[in-house]
Image (spheres, rainbow, N blue to C red):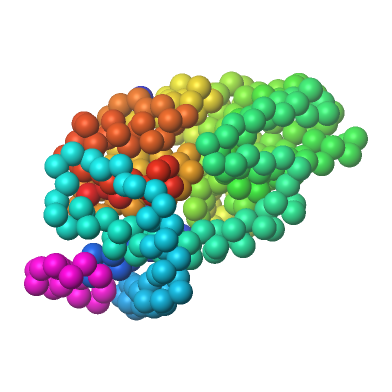
């Protein structure tokens, strides 16, 4: 099993923004529930006062929620699909049309933003995968690359160098040996150079991660100090803002478990597990109570069935869930 290292747990600006956004979605919904309690109101005010970013995100999403045209469209969408209720639902959650309408509006806004951000990747990519998809591609030199969910690459083979750009997501490379033609994977933060080896490159929010399963690779940061590191089999490093971490040993089978449709975690925060499941889930997952995100999770999960993962988490931990088909799941 894999235990997330301190390097992996660092909070980047993108992570922080995503976290605030998910919290703001939950607060928009809760505050539009007429039975909100005074202590909830005080908790919200303390949350909103944490920073200008908290207040700005809430105001933006709340403003959209209050738009009558968006709200009417969300209600119509909610009414077309009955909720699948979890066990022991509270009275507030049973008032699902209002709850789902609020979240549906927020989800619609976020979906539009994600669509526009993804357009450039679509234009640049030679190969890409959608949510929950994996794809294996044979390259011109007979090397292969397997793309994980929501991933994209562009390739250049010009007779002197074999070059692949990881535009987003995660990819597993099996490189055919050819000392005269280096194989280079370019990601946002680093260049990974190999001759004949197997390795995984993942573009995380704010940093890149390289894990070597077989052989040896050379990783060079693309900015800052332009530092270089050799990474042997069974080791991993991160590159952030031009700085390379020291390679550290990892469980290669766990890191590459996604190739088998599995997520393996050992003592990982529930919030981080849900972030992983979001990569495979075809809709939006909202963690209503952020305190639940502190629960530690150990286990093996089937990411080819992300809805099943959520159901298993609900059965295993003190969680409840309501869902709207396979497009919206609220955990609380």
The answer to whether any part of residue 255 appears in the image is no
Q: Is residue 197 left or right of residue 259?
A: right
Q: Residue furthest right?
A: 159
Q: How many marks?
A: 0
Q: Position of residue 89 (x, y in %)?
A: 17, 46
Q: Is residue 214 above or below residue 101?
A: above
Q: Nearer the viewer, residue 132 or 174?
A: 132
User: Residue at left 14%, top 51%?
Assistant: 90
- Percent across and percent down for residue 198 are 62, 24
Q: Is residue 265 visible?
A: yes
Q: Is residue 143 above or below residue 102?
A: above
Q: Position of residue 243 (x, y in %)?
A: 53, 52
Name the residue at 26% across, 74% down: 48
Residue at screen point 48% across, 26% down: 261
Left or right, residue 222 beside residue 55: right
At a point 43% along the width and 30% down the height, the residue shown is 305
Question: Residue 35: within the magenta?
Answer: yes
**Image vertical order of residue 75 relative to residue 3, above or below:** below
Q: Could you say which quadrant of the image residue 178 lies in?
A: top right
Query: Which of the image's four quarters has the N terminus?
Result: top left
Q: Which residues are magenta?
A: 32-50
Residue nearest the viewer, comparing 251 with 114: 114
Dividing the picture into quadrants, the one containing residue 153 is top right
């Amino acid at each position: 099993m894999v235990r997330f290292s301190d390097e992996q747990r660092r909070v980047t600006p993108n992570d922080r923004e995503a976290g605030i956004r998910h919290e703001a979605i939950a607060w928009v919904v809760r505050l539009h529930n007429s039975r909100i309690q005074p202590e909830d109101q005080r908790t919200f005010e303390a949350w909103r006062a944490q920073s200008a970013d908290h207040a700005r995100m809430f105001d933006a999403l709340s403003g959209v929620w209050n738009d009558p045209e968006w709200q009417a469209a969300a209600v119509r969408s909610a009414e077309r699909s009955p909720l699948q209720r979890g066990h022991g639902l509270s009275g507030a959650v049973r008032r699902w049309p209002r709850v789902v309408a609020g979240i549906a509006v927020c989800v619609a806004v976020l979906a539009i933003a994600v669509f526009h951000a993804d357009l450039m990747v679509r234009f640049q990519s030679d190969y890409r995968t959608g949510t929950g998809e994996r794809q294996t591609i044979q390259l011109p030199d007979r090397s292969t690359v397997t793309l994980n969910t929501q991933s994209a690459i562009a390739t250049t083979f010009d007779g002197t160098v074999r070059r692949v750009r990881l535009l987003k997501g995660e990819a597993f490379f099996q490189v055919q040996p050819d000392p005269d033609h280096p194989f280079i994977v370019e990601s946002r933060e680093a260049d990974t150079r190999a001759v004949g080896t197997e390795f995984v490159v993942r573009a995380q929010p704010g940093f890149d991660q390289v894990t070597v399963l077989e052989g040896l690779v050379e990783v060079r940061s693309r900015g800052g100090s332009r530092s270089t590191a050799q990474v042997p089999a069974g080791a991993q490093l991160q590159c952030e803002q031009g700085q390379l971490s020291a390679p550290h040993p990892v469980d290669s089978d766990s890191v590459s478990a996604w190739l088998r449709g599995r997520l393996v975690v050992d003592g990982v925060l529930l919030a981080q597990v849900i972030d992983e499941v979001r990569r495979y889930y075809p809709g939006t997952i909202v963690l209503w109570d952020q305190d639940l995100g502190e629960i530690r999770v150990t286990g093996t999960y089937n990411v080819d069935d992300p809805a099943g993962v959520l159901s298993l988490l609900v059965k295993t931990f003190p969680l409840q869930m309501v869902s709207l088909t396979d497009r919206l799941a609220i955990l609380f």
